[in-house]
Image: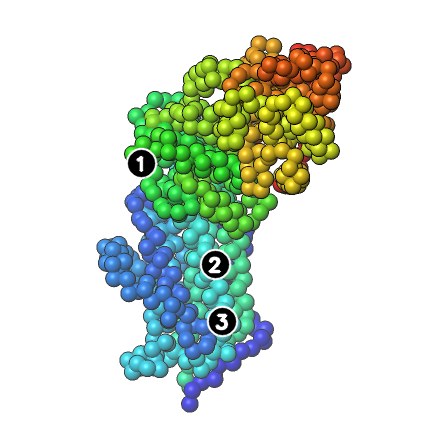
Amino acid sequence: MAGVITTTTKQAPKTDYQRHWMFAESDDKAMLKQIEETHFPDNREFDVKPIIQIIEDILRRATPSFDGVPKGTQEHVDTVEDKTLLVEFDLLFEQTAHLLHKISCEISCKFSGGGDAHATIMTLLRTLSIYSWDAKLVLTIAAFAVNYGEFSLISQLRPTNLLAKSVAFLKQLPDIKEHSKSLKPQFEALSKLIEVIIDVTKCIVEIKELPSQYISDEKPPLLSAKSYIPTTTYWTIRGILACSTQIASLIGRTLGHEYTVSSTEAWELSSLAHQINIRHQHLKDLLTLCHQQIDEKMRQEKIEILIRITKTPQLDNMKLLKELLHPSEELVIGMTKKKINIEVLRRKHVILLISGLDIHQDEIIILNHYQADPLVRQGQKMHYEMVWLPIVDSVAMAQYSLEENRRDFERLQSMIIWNTVLDPFAIEPAVIEFVKNIWHFEKRTIAVSLDPQGKVASENALPMMWIWANLSFPFSKETEEALWKSTEYATWRLELLADSVDPRIIDWMTKENTFICLYGGDDIEWIRKFTTEAKAVAKNAKITLELFYVGKNNVARERMRKITEIIAKEELSDCWTGTELTYLWYFWVRLESMLYSKMQSKKTAENDAVMKELMTVHSFNGGEQGWAVVCRSLSDEMARGNGEIVLKSLQEFEKWKEQAENNRFVLALRDHMEKLHTPEHCTRLILPGTTSTGGIPPDQKVVCAVCYRPMERYLLYRCCTD
């Protein structure tokens, strides 16, 4: 008749087993000296990770689940069947097999048979004296895993294997399935203790493998962690001995008599697991501090490497690009999602487009247009390659979840025809800091231009790209200066103001005796009055006048959409509608770029005629009313004025009609508007502090385009989700 296993909570005098675990925390200091006296490492290289891998596999499979199927029986079969892996470990285990057997005997024969826990631990530590602390633990756990694995293997096979059944009979092993209800608390406590032992061992292994070039073991926190490891090793081996004792206690108590499992034994295992876990948590906290220190040192080193590369002549651009785009060294061709190796960029001009995930859709549309320009390609070979490097910093990650940010990235990536990084969330923090501090990226898009040797040709080539598109290749400061000096862009003309923005305007500029008026603002009533008056004056003056509405900068897109719909519906003038509103954005970003470019070159309204006109147009845009610029095709004649003056001048056309004859309309209009000017004025120049065109330095002196006096500086905060 099979024995009966029952559970009892009856209190009993402390047994020798119980007294084994009654050492207090205060004993640590007293024992530390004894423990360290057993430690004489010979600094041999001993890779414990393969052993941990096998240990975890054994323990996972050995622990019963009390549903009749041991844990791991159906899972991870590939681990054992991976012959390549086992062959690779053969040599390592040949060297440790005898040692594991010796430790196993020490645990199962001496201690489990009633020996003293402390004495057994000290014997084991002396046996393992030449090994590091992590190796001592791993080898001891491995020896226990062998014993536990053999016990579990016999228990699992006994129902179907006669050999296992006979061995179980001779060892008097309990039928775990039959007595699962009584044994469950004991095995659950055992499983939790084993889990804690594995966790703290892995933590100690991780501490040992910390890179010494980034952290010193002579200073906290690593010094504190290493000082704590010897006693933690001692108590973890205690836990291993407790596990071994629990397994040994099941032998020889199955048949012929009742076997009582005291709930106190399960409590003792849980208590020991709790104590080891406290030590584990302390080591984890110290390990976290170690990683923070290492990360900081690595971050500083990475930034120093990037700075050194940018300041040192290189054979090509690969070194810098690999440091920036690491770790994947792969790129993706935007919407096609085709992966390419970073080597395609070797010795090419490269534009690094750096932005957040809030990059303006209009920017992508225009840059796609640049990339698709046939002039950029010669025999399928690009003049330059563009790579989108999105910066997703801690602020962005705090605002939105990783999934939301990833969706935004994939949405934008699907719109792009040039190269992008494979995974923006893998970009190293040091790279983000370098881009912000060295290349001055804040919020809006910048384009860093690199020559084929990786030298920075411009920290932000985007302004010149907005102004001249691909004509600014190779996007260097020298090219920018040369373009401003060229005849085409040295004077304020309609070609500079609206070059390549819209084919209709370009067509008008090439027609003889055509007058073109670009006007803006967001007051629809003023727009109605102005366009009506302008058409009447053109008819009266018998001239061809083309009107084109260019909107207002820094105004919500939805407002611009509504205004342009009214203009188109009422046929007030030509304008951009629907998806064409991208060109409205482009018109203004070009003007901002010109202003920024001139300011970077230290130009002012006093010493540069183009700068004066740029500031005037921007000041018109900052006003409450509209404004207008009128010019004659195939000439440099231009007249401009704010909404009030230009409208009044048109209303008073009869006063200057005679002067406007013989194609002198623009000059006559300009003369009359000058007569209407008064000394009193309030000019406002509204420019974003950080834009896709760059930024206005805080110490930049800005003078009024009307009176040349220094303008006062104010801060304007705006929130616009459009």
Nearer-the-camera pick, 108 or 599: 599
Q: Quadrant of the N terminus?
A: bottom left
Q: Which of the two discs, 3 and 2, labels the residue nearer the N terminus?
A: 3
Nearer-the-camera pick, 50 or 226: 50
* Dot 1 amino acid type: Gln
The image's mark for residue 380 is 1
* Dot 2 amino acid type: Val
Q: Which structural element holds mark 1?
A: loop
- Does the residue at mark 3 contact the one at mark 2 (Cβ under 8 Å)? no
Assess disc 2: are there few (<14), some (14-19) or many (≥20) residues with their C-alpha within 10 Å of its C-alpha.
Answer: many
The residue sitting at 42% across, 43% down in the picture is 334
* Dot 3 amino acid type: Gln
The residue sitting at 59% across, 73% down in the picture is 11
- Does the residue at mark 2 contact the one at mark 1 (Cβ under 8 Å)? no
The residue pinned by badge 2 equals: 196
The residue sitting at 36% across, 76% down in the picture is 156
The residue sitting at 41% across, 80% down in the picture is 175
Q: Which of the two discs, 2 and 1, labels the residue nearer the N terminus?
A: 2
- Classify 412 as above or below 235: above
Alpha carbon separation for disc pair 3 and 2: 16 Å
Nearer-the-camera pick, 454 or 270: 454
The residue pinned by badge 3 equals: 186
Q: Answer with the quarter of the image where residue 386 lies.
A: top left
Residue 380 x, y percent position in the rendering: 31, 36
Q: Which structural element holds mark 3?
A: helix
Nearer-the-camera pick, 432 or 220: 432
